[in-house]
Amino acid sequence: MTRLFLIFALSLFACAAQAQTVYKCVEAGKTSYADRPCAQGASRPLPPPPAGIPLGDTMGPQGGDARTLLELEKARIAREKAQEKEGRVQIRQAKAMQAQRKKCDKLRLRHKWAEEDLARTVRGPKHEAARLKLRRQAEALAVECPA
């Protein structure tokens, strides 16, 4: 929002400051424009626009038209929101995949234990119960984790 205000203010005073030198200041990675060199950071004077060309043409779409600035700002905000939403969707998908993997690992472990229980039992009613448990574990594993 500050950048938008700065651009708007520069466009209002651009006609009056046309003959003055404008300095582009870069401080801590932030760029600003001023009529004096920067106290700290890198500054460099910008050349005045060529004579005969209207000022609005030299500034491009960031120049004088406030509606264009608002449209550009709205488009930027919409892009940022879309990127944030995409990031949240990816995080949600990653969590869901992790939960599914954990569930499948748990089912595989139960299936393995059921196989071990079946191998330990001797013929009789306990053996039949272990075989039924193993079959049910295998079916649950096949339904939940087909791969």
Image (cartoon, rainbow, N blue to C red):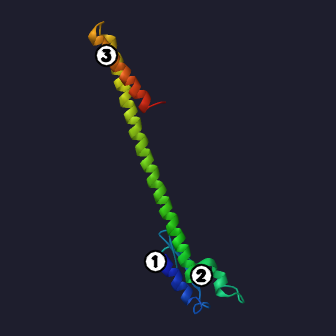
- Tell me the number on the disc at residue 18: none
Q: Earlier in the sequence, mark 3 or mark 1?
A: 1
Q: Mark 3 or 1, which is nearer the eye?
A: 3
Judged left or right of residue 20, residue 83 is left
Kindly identify the amino acid type of the residue bearing the numbered disc 1: Thr
Q: Quadrant of residue 102?
A: top left
Q: Which mark is residue 2?
A: 1
Circle 2 residues within 10 Å: few <14, some 14–19, many ≥20:
some
Closer to us: 144 or 115 = 144
| Amino acid type at image mark 3 | Ala
Q: Nearer the viewer, residue 33 or 112?
A: 112
- Residue 65 point in image, percent of width and height: 58, 83
**In-front residue for pair 120/23:** 120
Would you say 22 lies left or right of 84 here?
A: right
Q: Residue at x 41, y 38 (%)?
A: 100
> Which residue is label 2 attached to?
63
- For mark 1, give the secondary structure: helix
Tag 2 and tag 3, C-beta contact below 8 Å: no
Find residue 116 and report its horizontal and vertical position in percent.
Answer: 34, 16
Q: Nearer the viewer, residue 83 or 137?
A: 137
In this figure, what is the number of numbered marks? Answer: 3
Residues under labels 2 and 3: Cα distance? 79 Å
User: Residue 48, percent across and down?
Assistant: 65, 85
Rendering coords of residue 51 (x, y %): 71, 89
Q: Which mark is residue 130?
A: 3
Mark 2 or mark 3: name the one nearer the start of the chain: 2
